[in-house]
Image: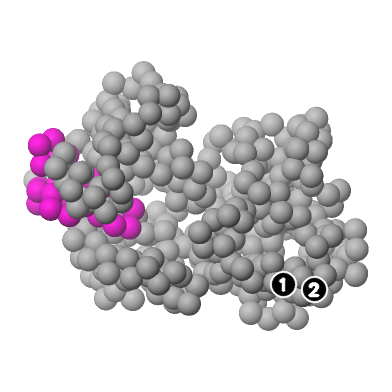
Amino acid sequence: MRIGIDIRLIGKNRTGDEAVFFNLTKNLAKIDSENEYLLFTDVTDEGKLSEILKRLEIEDKRNFKIISIETKNRFSWNFLTLPAYLRKNPVDVYLTQYIVPFFVPKKIKIVTIIHDISFNFFPQFIRKSDLLFLKTLIPLSIEKADKVLGVSRFTRDEIVKFYKTEPEKVDFFHNAVSEDFKSQDVSEEKLREVKKKYGLPEKFFLYVGTLQPRKNIPFLLESYAQIKDKTADTKLVLVGNRQAHNFDARIDEAVRKHNLEEIVVFPGFIDEQDKAAVYKLAHVFVFPSLYEGFGIPVLESFEMGTPVLAADIPSLREVGGDGALFADPESIDKFSKALYDISIEEKLRSELMSSGSRRAGLFSWMKTAEDVLGKLQCLANKTK
């Protein structure tokens, strides 16, 4: 097969979706020396392209090639630039996320990954321009795609149910923790260095992810405010980009309302090589999100032996299993009690760390790459 993969996200400092395409592509390179891969990007800078080659470990892979195509914006990419290239240089299967390319030859089989469809359930948290874009093009893309892949069984079922899609057209795979993350330095010296670099407190609850409204951070702040006097030595660290375009302004309001200015820390974007150490330093990892497609930070916490308190929602149950403590993300009383319990009960903490470590072993990008490659091969074979 000639397999095309949209790798435009790689190198863009995105969170979950970049990690998916990076780790999937990197592990496909490890397991597949037979099929030809064309990796499509809008990056044109030679230095950045060289860095992508190096990070993916494909510098010596003769069956992997980066195709750099300059484009004006994401609209022209899918409607003009990429289709023009594919008409002259067709692939058998093209893998992207969300919005598929239009006006490509029918013999090219299109596979799109849908990380979540939260915008359908929390439209009040999305900018109107973005919502119009998603509401218009996602249904068209799902209809046009030959295969749709969710990142969890929950997401797969949500797509089928919401878009009334034929069940056989939609499948799923599971995300995992990257090998790069697992191999990061978490020595005592590294922990001291990272603590100083980001101004981290001695003891803290940790959140890592975007600071969008559906992540429910104001709720976390209110839950934390309920117990802060009983856990006076434990601060709250919120890792995420406060300058991101969908930053939840209610976060700053909640900090002021509950007088948390001195005990909530915003370290900003964490360098990739420091992430494992940040998780390792945390007393508890907290993930209060109202809606997730998967939840890689939960698995990253498991890998670092950090107890996890997660929102009691289906996708996080699917990921966390018996490795996390779950609480209602809409009940301040229940969530704050769970936060207090996981902070002070050593037996509970020990049990969660043990079961979390076992749970982490069930997910790997190597297994996922094998799974996805099998799905692409099956799709290609059906059309021959």
Q: Residue at x 79, y 44 (%)?
A: 199
Q: Is residue 1 visible?
A: yes
Name the mark on residue 9.
Answer: none
Q: Position of residue 76 (x, y in %)?
A: 24, 50
* Marks 2,1: beta carbons within 8 A: yes
Disc number at residue 258?
A: 2
Read off the residue under disc 1. Answer: 254
Q: Is residue 98 magenta?
A: yes
Residue shown at the point (27%, 69%) measured from the top left: 136
Residue 358 lies, in percent from the top left, at: 63, 50
Residue 256 placement, left or right of 34: right
Q: How many marks?
A: 2
Residue 192 x, y percent position in the rendering = 81, 35
Secondary structure beneath dot 1 equals: helix
Q: Secondary structure at mark 2?
A: loop
- Looking at the magenta stretch, what is its main secondary structure? loop
The scheme the figure's colours follow is one colour
Residue 336 visible in the shown view: no
Rendered residue at 33%/22% (across/down): 61
Q: Please tell me whether residue 283 is drawn above or below residue 59 in the rendered image.
A: below
Q: Is residue 333 magenta?
A: no
Q: Which quadrant is the N terminus positioned in?
A: top left
Of residue 86 and residue 299, the one placed in the foreground of this image is 86
Give x and y (percent) for residue 252.
69, 67
Q: Amino acid at mark 1?
A: Ala
Graded by Cα atoms within 10 Å as few (under 14), some (14 to 19) or many (20 or more), the crowding at tag 2 reads few
Question: Which stretch appears magenta?
Answer: 87-109
The amino acid sitting under disc 2 is His
Q: Residue at x 28, y 37 (%)?
A: 70
Q: Hey, which quadrant is residue 348 in on the image?
A: bottom right
